[in-house]
Image: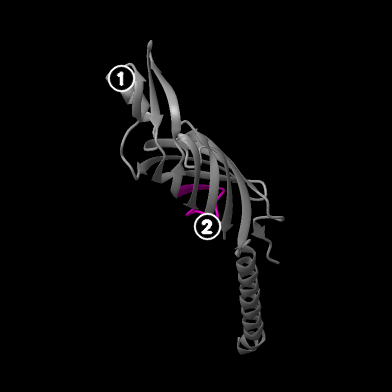
Amino acid sequence: MKILIKIFLPAIILTLNAAGVMAGNNFNRDSIYKMVIYQPVQVKLGLTSGWKAPHGTGIDFSLTINELVDINLGAGISISGTKIGVGARLYPLREKDFSPMIGAFLYHSGGMERITVTYNYDEAVYRINPNNAFQINAGARYRFGKGHYFIGALGYAFPFNKEGAEYINGSTLDTVRSVADAITIGGFAVYGGILIKLTPGNYRIPQF
């Protein structure tokens, strides 16, 4: 019995040690493979549109940092006039292709000198004065390809100047007035768009 122990005990110890080393190597290899390094900065060109979208129907240029946040500058046209502004978007689940999105924007609207508002058969002419607004919104981002995004969001815009549309002439019905006020810069917003990655390469840097 003692002879068997002397023969097999060292073999068992060596086997356990080898298994431990292999497990450690596998763990280290798996850990390395699971490490994800993102491109530090990506340049994206965005095309967006919607009701009271921060940049109207227009374009924005953004810098996406580590797939987590982007800072953008955009301009476009809208029913309340030309728009230009800056903003930021946060993507909390950067490791996922589908992530929630939170945005904040500050922008200027140039207004409309004259706009005809119609409700049923009643018409009136109003002026939409230039204004600034701060908008917060929340939505989702879907990533595809080498780092392109589809985005969509709902939000609310807070105008700096809370005056409504300025009446010029025509119908004085309250319903017509309400329609005119609805197209000013403030209020509920919904928009969507696509962000095209211009930076070469994949958004993820392979690790070996």
Amino acid type indicated by mark 1: Thr
In the rendered structure, which disc, 2 or 1, sits on the residue that comes first in sequence? 2
Residue 195 lies within the magenta run: no
Indicate the position of residue 31 as horizontal and vertical percent values: 60, 68
Amino acid type indicated by mark 2: Leu
Q: Which mark is residue 68?
A: 2
Q: Is residue 8 left or right of residue 191?
A: right
Tell me if residue 130 comes above or below residue 94 in the rendering: above
Highlighted magenta segment, given as a residue range: 90-103
Q: Is residue 14 left or right of residue 121?
A: right
Position of the C terminus by quadrant: bottom right
Residue 29 seen in this snapshot? yes
Give the residue drawn at x 62%, y 84%: 9
Q: Look at mark 1 in the image and give the residue it sits on.
A: 175
Give the residue drawn at x 57%, y 48%: 97
Q: Is residue 163 left or right of residue 104?
A: left
Secondary element type, mark 2 = loop
Q: Nearer the viewer, mark 2 or mark 1?
A: 1
* Quadrant in the picture for residue 130: top left
